[in-house]
Image (spheres, grey):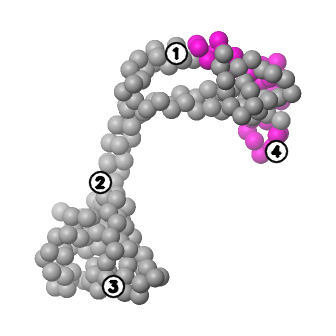
């Protein structure tokens, strides 16, 4: 497997400004963070690490992920596999639901992709989500994910300035937040 022992591609070293001889080691996929002396950082960059560091230092630095015998390609492949496993796990555990409250936005920023929608007429884009629509959305969420208590409960609100009072009292919406009644 791989090359001889060397510094991991995912090891980040940062010299501490407050202390002359100290560095912070950060490892990108193990999450390890440690403060070490400059001689450790210098030794990690040496061609023959085992001749510069003790067995205990090598063991600890390897366990924390800073030293490896994997090639860059092997590490990148491992990280890609690890990310894929985490993504699949999160997609099963965490469902997010989004409510488009309204497409009615009075900003009309020239770069906004929503401008295209508003140019097609305002008959539907001026509508605002009602309590009945929210109830139907919650019913649909329960059908899609019947055991929500086992998962996160993220709901994303999107659309215009949905929480602002728009010159009139809109049933269900009020200044500063949503109030359903």
Q: Which residues are magenta?
A: 107-136
Q: Which residue is mark 1?
A: 140
Find residue 159 and report its horizontal and vertical position in percent: 70, 32
Q: Which residue is mark 3?
A: 38
Residue at 53% across / 28% down in the picture? 97
Which quarter of the picture shows residue 53?
bottom left
Q: Which residue is mark 2?
A: 78
The tag earlier along the polypeptide, 3 or 4, is: 3
Q: Dominant secondary structure of the magenta stretch?
A: loop
User: Considering only vertical position in the picture, is 87 above or below 153?
Assistant: below
Magenta stretch holds residue 111: yes
Which quarter of the picture shows residue 165?
top right
Residue at 43% across / 32% down in the picture? 152
**What separation in Å lies between label 3 and label 4 (alpha carbons)?**
52 Å
156 with respect to 3 (left or right): right
Q: Secondary structure at mark 1?
A: helix
């Amino acid at each position: 497997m791989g090359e001889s022992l060397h510094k991991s591609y995912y090891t980040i070293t940062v010299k501490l400004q407050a202390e002359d001889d100290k560095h912070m080691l950060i490892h990108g996929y193990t999450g390890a963070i440690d403060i070490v002396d400059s001689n450790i950082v210098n030794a990690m960059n040496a061609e023959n690490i085992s001749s510069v560091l003790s067995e205990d230092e090598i063991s600890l630095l390897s366990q924390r992920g800073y030293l490896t015998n994997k090639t860059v390609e092997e590490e990148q492949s491992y990280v890609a596999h690890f990310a894929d496993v985490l993504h699949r796990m999160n997609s099963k555990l965490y469902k997010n639901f989004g409510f488009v409250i309204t497409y009615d936005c009075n900003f009309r920023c020239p770069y906004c992709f929503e401008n295209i929608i508003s140019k097609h007429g305002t008959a539907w884009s001026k509508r605002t989500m009602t309590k009945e629509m929210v109830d139907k959305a919650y019913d649909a969420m329960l059908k899609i994910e019947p055991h929500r208590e086992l998962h996160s409960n993220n709901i994303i609100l999107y659309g215009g300035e949905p929480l602002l009072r728009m010159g009139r009292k809109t049933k269900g919406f009020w200044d500063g937040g949503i109030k359903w009644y």
